[in-house]
Amino acid sequence: MLVLFIAGCSNNTQTSSVTENTLKGAKFTFFDVGQGDSTLIQADDGTTILIDTGRHDDNRILTYLEKANIEKIDLLLLTHPHSDHIGNADKVIKQYKPKEIWMDGLVFNSSIYERVIDAALASDAKYKEPRRGEKATFGPFGIQVLSPDKLSDNANNDSIAIRLTYKDIAAIFTGDAEKSREREMVDSGLDLNAQILDLGHHGSSTSNQPYFLDAVKPEVAVYSAEKGNSYGHPHREVIQWLKDRDITTYGTDVEGTVTIETDGKQIHVATEKSGTPEPGSTSGKQTAEEPGAAVPMPDAININKATAEELQYLPSIGPVLADKIISERPYRTIDDLKKINGIGDGIVRQIKEQGKATVK
């Protein structure tokens, strides 16, 4: 385990150690959930906040929560309805019965979203759709909503973005909000300064713009991505922008789960394994035959002929859905994918936006 000590509001660093299971203060755990997102925030008084729940085809978050001995969740914040962020939310709601659930309110046509909404409505949780400027308190944590002000019908840009404070330490989470929303946040006049930044959209250059980084001035940045992902996360520009500003950066793709502990004045960063965040590329995923090597991403993916591995280059398509796609062939149009249980309008929209899928 690699550990870094960072004093709040300074750039001094030195090695230190974090004692397991002796939380004194607050802890931010950025889980390694592949090409998804999930962060657990805990305080020593027992307050627990979970932001997003990982991919629908990867339930590692449930194992992580069990190993962390989580018994309750005070706030479940689902930034936006894409399946890599709300994938296990229905299971989390049923098992941990959160006291409060936040969603952005964007109606999304996918079976995953529908399951989450059904679980939320069936629970005793207080349901809320927060908007910019609203404030809330959960135990020792203060939260101010940075975005959205109003919905734009764009799932990424309608992500709930917050600034969370614990004593003198602040952290910002923006989901997949892109640069237009970042500009709105900067122009809003709200306090964006924070020591910790959860990089937007898995480290994509559609987010994390220089003007936003300059407004936040983080000492530590963390992104969540899968190693060798087909989106090229983290993007080269973002890594360079972070280096230019001497922002210490961690990535779950190469360092596994990243944990930050704080007493409210200083922060300790620990990683599951050693690694150096580097720019991704669109070269794709590693092969089992040659670890570290990559299979070039096809220019086009014929959903009537592609292998299960090739189909997984499509947004939100994992091994289970890839097998289902193969079993339901042939398709006349991309929209025909919606006949598969687990694929709705939202996933089809993402596939079309990627522009790789074809039926010919």
Image (tube, grey):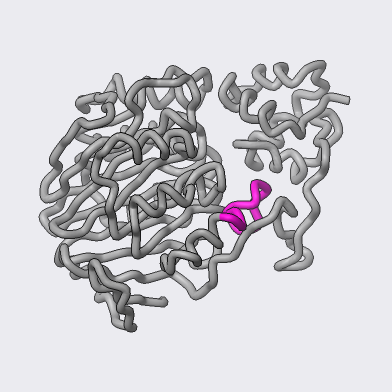
* Quadrant hosting residue 357: top right
The dominant secondary structure in magenta is: loop
Residue at the spot 51% in from the left edge and 22% down from the top edge: 111
Q: Is residue 117 above or below residue 357?
A: above
Residue at the spot 41% in from the left edge and 47% down from the top edge: 212
Residue at the spot 26% in from the left edge and 38% down from the top edge: 189
Q: In this view, does 6 lie above or below 73?
A: below
Q: Position of residue 306 (x, y in %)?
A: 82, 37
Say which of 121 and 176 sits in front.
Answer: 176
The reply, left or right, for residue 83 in relation to residue 150 is right
Q: What stretch of residues is rendered in magenta? A: 226-237
Q: Position of residue 162 (x, y in %)?
A: 29, 41
Q: Where is residue 200 in the image (x, y as percent from the top left)?
A: 45, 46
Q: So how many labels did they put on this image?
A: 0
* Quadrant hosting residue 45: bottom left
Extreme-bottom residue of the structure: 15
Say which of 288 and 271 sits in front.
Answer: 271
Give the quadrant of the C terminus.
Answer: top right
The reply, left or right, for residue 239 in relation to residue 103 is right
Residue 78 visible in the snapshot = no
